Image: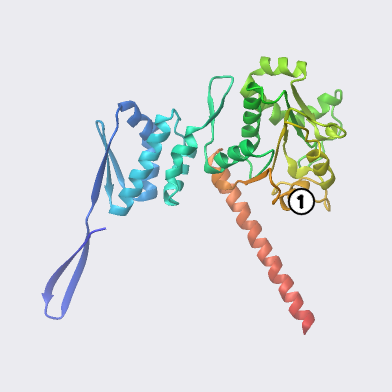
Amino acid sequence: MLIIIVTFMFRRDIIIQREVIAMFEQIINVDRMEQAVSLFGSFDENIRLIEKEFGVNVISRGSEIKVVGEAENVQKGIRAVNGLLTLINRGESLSDQNVRYVIALVKEDNDGELEKMTADCICISAKGKPIKSKTLGQKKYIENIRNNTVTLGVGPAGTGKTYLAVAMAVTAFRAKEVNRIVLTRPAVEAGEKLGFLPGDLQQKVDPYLRPLYDALFDMLGAESFQKHQERGDIEVAPLAYMRGRTLDDSFIILDEAQNTTSEQMKMFLTRLGFNSKMVVTGDITQIDLPDGKKSGLKEALSILKNIEGIGITRFNEKDVVRHRLVQDIIRAYEKSEEERERKDGDRKGQGNNGKRR
């Protein structure tokens, strides 16, 4: 930043100094007007975010985009604009989520990873939409699934743990790397008693498995999913159905694993057969087990961390790809939990001091 000191002499004993901050500008040329339109967004909402976060002005003049401000801020603003143009050139639609994520990467000096992150297409959905990683955490998760036999994906809601695991399963199935997909989750109510549910056993457990069905419908389409399910190529079942089985040539996903007990987790992991992959997903901050029951996922994270062939990915709130408020909500709950633990620790410390007296 260039600062010019201007000194004014009014009286012999009074000196006034003023700092005049020189403004810098840098220009980016875009190939097509469509790029500039996508970059700015509806009512210039994308550019306004960049201007607010970095304290710069962004001006569009024909095929030129000019960034004006203090030197350091201009450099960051230029990197953010280039990052968004990278997404646009990869065919990505800009949203509040990915604009904010690019800004966060620039602030952390990680924007160089952006091109690698968007280059990899996992699969194409039933509607022709390419499924790609949207954050560095998701990129690491996909690499872990590719390179390991068992992968544990742990983190808050909205980070794409289940969706990406299903995408990887469908990719392996289409490539004939596996013969079937098995998706399962424990049938545990989320903090409330639902009472009697009508229908046969399958109809009773279907509500618990709905997120898995939704992901499969998105990847395969309802008709294709139905056909594969009737053939036995795709199985969606509660965890209790897994006991006593060996799953060869399969891609197996255990969802909501934080609600497994230690015994259930061990039972599930030991179903692994030859030429199979397992993905275990869950959020250890949303455990619905009865009081006194230890989460099998929390225990597995500790027990399995140093075993070759088992990869662990931990997501955080920056990997959330839902509404921006979801990130803020997760951050607020984490802060509250840390504060509560700190207070509990202080109380225990005071209690021990009292006993020593």
* Residue under the point 83% across and 33% down: 242
Dot 1 corresponds to which residue? 299
| Picture quarter with the C terminus | bottom right
Examine the rendered structure and indicate whether residue 23 appears above or below residue 357. above
How far across and how far down the image is residue 231, in percent?
A: 76, 16
Q: Determine which quarter of the picture holds residue 326.
A: top right
Q: Determine which quarter of the picture holds residue 139.
A: top right
| Picture quarter with the N terminus | bottom left
* Residue under the point 82% across and 47% down: 262
* Residue under the point 23% across and 52% down: 23
Mark 1 residue element: helix
Q: Is residue 320 visible?
A: no
How far across and how far down the image is residue 37, in percent?
A: 34, 29
Q: Is residue 216 visible?
A: yes
Closest to the observer, 121 or 107 = 121
Q: Amino acid at mark 1?
A: Glu
Q: Determine which quarter of the picture holds residue 168.
A: top right
Q: In the orientation shown, which residue stands out farthest toward the bottom?
A: 357
Q: Judge left or right: residue 29 versus residue 129.
A: left
Classify 10 Å Cα crowding around label 1: few (below 14), some (14-19), many (20 and above).
some
Q: Judge left or right: residue 227 versus residue 271.
A: left
How far across and how far down the image is residue 225, in percent?
A: 69, 19
